[in-house]
Amino acid sequence: MPFTPFHMGPGLALKALIGRHFSLMVFGFSQVAIDLEPLVRILRGDAELHGFTHTYLGATLVALASIVVGRPVCEFLLRYWNPDPTSRILNWIPAPKTIPWSAAAVGAFVGTYSHVLLDSVMHSDMRPLAPLSDSNALLHVITVESLHLACVLAAVLGVLLLFAVARLRPERR
């Protein structure tokens, strides 16, 4: 199914680990962008859902587009993300108003490449190395349930780490 939230789990964990060097918003933007093709294919009733954008070559182009288009879109959204400073729930989420180009690039490329990697494990119509190869060596290397569990655990770990880092920031003491 397009736009699966499971893909965000590894992104949350990575954001917790490398912080400002990784744009979680551009990562999320690239997740949605790469799944526009399967959405269109679902609406058309195609038998094959995962085509060019779900190859590493296609993912590279989607990542580049996500940097150029996604960065300004995400910055626009960040200008309106202004949690109430007295809120006990949202004020721990750091929300800078700008996204460095380097963080956007890391978010976009990690987003698209991890998307192809994760989908390669579970979708039989994936050909991640096309046009060089039509094979998919990762298909079913683990069960879909194990893959989903790993993504959920990465999300939980990421959120816990983000919360811990935010609580340890000097301005929070």
Image (cartoon, helix red, strand yellow):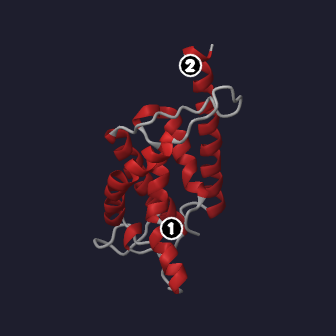
Amino acid beneath label 1: Leu
Q: What residue sits right under mark 2 in the picture?
A: 169
Q: Is residue 172 above or below residue 76?
A: above
Image quadrant in which the N terminus is located: bottom right
Q: Is residue 139 above or below residue 87?
A: below
Q: Residues within 10 Å of mark 2 (few under 14, many from 20)?
A: few
Cα gap from disc 2 to disc 1, whole angstroms = 42 Å
Q: What residue sits right under mark 1 in the picture?
A: 139
Residue 71 in the figure: left or right of residue 119: left
Label 2 secondary element? loop
Q: Position of residue 65 (x, y in %)?
A: 33, 58
**Furthest-right residue in view?**
88
Q: Position of residue 34 (x, y in %)?
A: 44, 64
Q: In percent of the image, x 39 and y 39: which residue is there?
A: 99
Q: In percent of the image, x 48 and y 77: which residue is there?
A: 40
Q: Position of residue 160 (x, y in %)?
A: 64, 34
Residue 15 in the figure: left or right of residue 106: right
Residue 154 in which image quadrant: top right
Q: In percent of the image, x 47 and y 69: which residue is there?
A: 36
Asked if the residue at tag 1 contacts the one at tag 2, i.e. Cβ–Cβ closer than 8 Å, the answer is no
